[in-house]
Amino acid sequence: MSDLTVRRADVRDLDFLVAGNLAMAKETEDLSLDGDTLRLGISHMLNSAADGLYLIAEQHGNPAGNLMITYEWSDWRNGRFWWIQSVYVHPDFRRQGVYRALHEAVREMVQADHEACGIRLYVEKENFN
């Protein structure tokens, strides 16, 4: 995908993140999330680096997809796992390398973090989208 960039999300991405999470929950688990609660939860994450972060993939300045990272401390490894969660790619951008770009950005960030000990991704077995 040409002109695809990945950056850390911020408050200007709130509406896209809320819409994407609402759509992802409906598509993958047939869940209808409460939009107000979701907005508060995403706002918290955008303002709390200790809890995690969101990444946004853009093409020509338009948001194409996102994922969220949360952290889990491992006493066995004396390090921090990065959990990939809340992955969403807008339907107009699917099958164009958006997730691949997001995942590569996570890998680069993990390699630069001296406390990181690995990446984990939970996959819903019934998700065929």
Image (spheres, grey):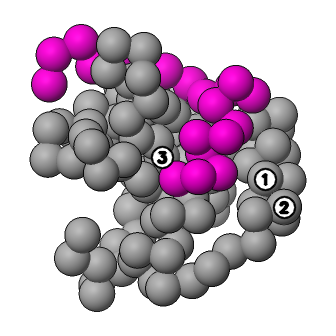
Q: Is 120 placed above or below 107 here?
A: below
Q: Tell me the distance, in whole angstroms, between the alpha carbons under discs 3 and 2.
A: 20 Å
The residue most toward the front is 92
Left or right of 75? Residue 38 is: right
Give the residue drawn at x 65%, y 51%: 18
> Callout 2, which amino acid?
Asp
Q: Secondary structure at mark 3?
A: strand
State which tag comes first along the sequence, 3 or 2. Answer: 2
Q: Nearer the viewer, residue 74 or 1?
A: 1
Circle 1/circle 2 CB separation < 8 Å: yes
How many angstroms separate mark 3 from mark 1 (CA)?
15 Å
Along the polypeptide, which appears first: circle 3 or circle 1? 1
Q: Which mark is residue 39?
A: 1
Amino acid type indicated by mark 3: Leu
Image spot of residue 102 (x, y percent):
35, 36
Q: Which residue is mark 2?
A: 36
The boundaries of the magenta stretch are 1-20
